[in-house]
Image: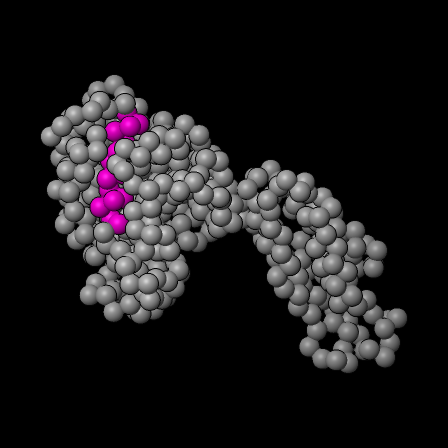
Amino acid sequence: MKEFVKALAAHYEEIQLSYFQHLHAHPELSFAEYETSAYIKTQLTRFGVTIVEGISGTSVVGILDSGKAGPVIAFRADMDALPLQEDTELAYQSVNSGVMHACGHDSHTATLLTLAQLLAENQTLIKGKVKFIFQSAEEKLPGGALKLCQEGVMDDVDSIYAFHCSSMVPLGVIATTIGATSACIGTYDVVIHGKGGHICNPDQALNPVPVACTMATTLNQILAEKVSPLEKAVFTISYIQAGQRENIIASEAKLGGSIRTFNNELSAALFDQVRTVCNGICAAYGCTCHISTTVGYPAAVNTQAETILVDRAVDLLGYERWLTEPAMNGEDFSYYLLKKPGSMFYIGMAVDDTEKIFPHHNCHFQLNPQGLLIALEIELAVYLNAIGWENKTL
């Protein structure tokens, strides 16, 4: 399979690069990817890929149906950019002021668009259906994946795959994880209602500041006392706000923070603890409070069989493979994985010049264009493995 995949993908290298450069130069923010969406639809229509009707917003879903019995294999690419002014001096840098592809979603979209063209032009490779999901708004809650799942995009899918580029991992290194690969993310905000007054008469007021301090100290013990040490979780108190003057007792105090864990059920339990602690402390001090919680993306949990399939594709192509620990970042690919089995993996695309290696979400962020072809090869090999394709030659 190695020689076949590499030779076929190489035919599309320049096409893929042209897609990437166009997308990089024309970034759009989450939920506003109007030109990007139109561009993708134009290209898919040109290839003969069927555009799924009834998809809301700017996301685009295409289908290739072989007409033969077989599985429905889906690939996802996110396509939104970030509110940053690009400072890379690339020949194809952003022409949209204050907007930049600083997380590599352009590489994801360009690769999936190229895979769609490759399979549309080589339909003897297809068995069953291939679904191409171009998703809006991975960078902004509630994310584009949730709406797509609600609209039934995953209902007929058997398995789903996606890659994320990495500017910090060496070119051609592929990182995979069985199980959780990203965290369940959530935030909490607490408003403590006291009674304002003059500092000369504290007995006539209800000072919410000591309440907030006691609350913060107690909340900080939740992980140590209420969560198994075998669990991996983060609980932060990120801010406390109260008062304006040294001689005024404030009537209100605020505090809040974030929760991250690889266990979706644990996240809910932590929010319950926040409510119990905050309500109890307020009652003890004679205050009241309002607690609001926001559940962001669930943990993305790769299934074993599909990740092993990715590993096999990487090994067949001869690339270096790293087994990695999960990271505490959030990723809305998790919504697809709550519906059906699948796997997200990471492809190293670090540039050769070490002085130009910058992390994601940085105005100097850039990728090694050579990594695009590697990504195409791997997605193609993953697909062929997923349908049980037999070894062939060109």
Position of the N terminus by quadrant? top left
Name the residue: 27% across, 44% down: 375
Report whether 82 appears left or right of 282.
left
Q: Position of residue 299 (x, y in %)?
A: 51, 42
Please, is residue 131 above or below residue 164 in the view? above
Report whether 190 appears left or right of 337.
right
Q: Which residues are magenta?
A: 371-387
Please, is residue 359 above or below residue 135 in the view? below
Answer whether residue 379 is magenta in the image: yes
Q: Main secondary structure of the magenta part?
A: helix
Please, is residue 161 above or below residue 288 in the view? above
Name the residue: 19% across, 52% down: 17
Q: Position of residue 298 (x, y in %)?
A: 51, 42
Please, is residue 315 above or below residue 253 in the view? above
Closest to the observer, 246 or 320: 320
Report whether 176 appears left or right of 40.
right
Q: Position of residue 253 (x, y in %)?
A: 70, 65
Q: Quadrant of residue 388?
A: top left
Q: Position of residue 86 (x, y in %)?
A: 31, 67
Name the residue: 81% across, 66% down: 206
Closest to the observer, 292 or 235: 235
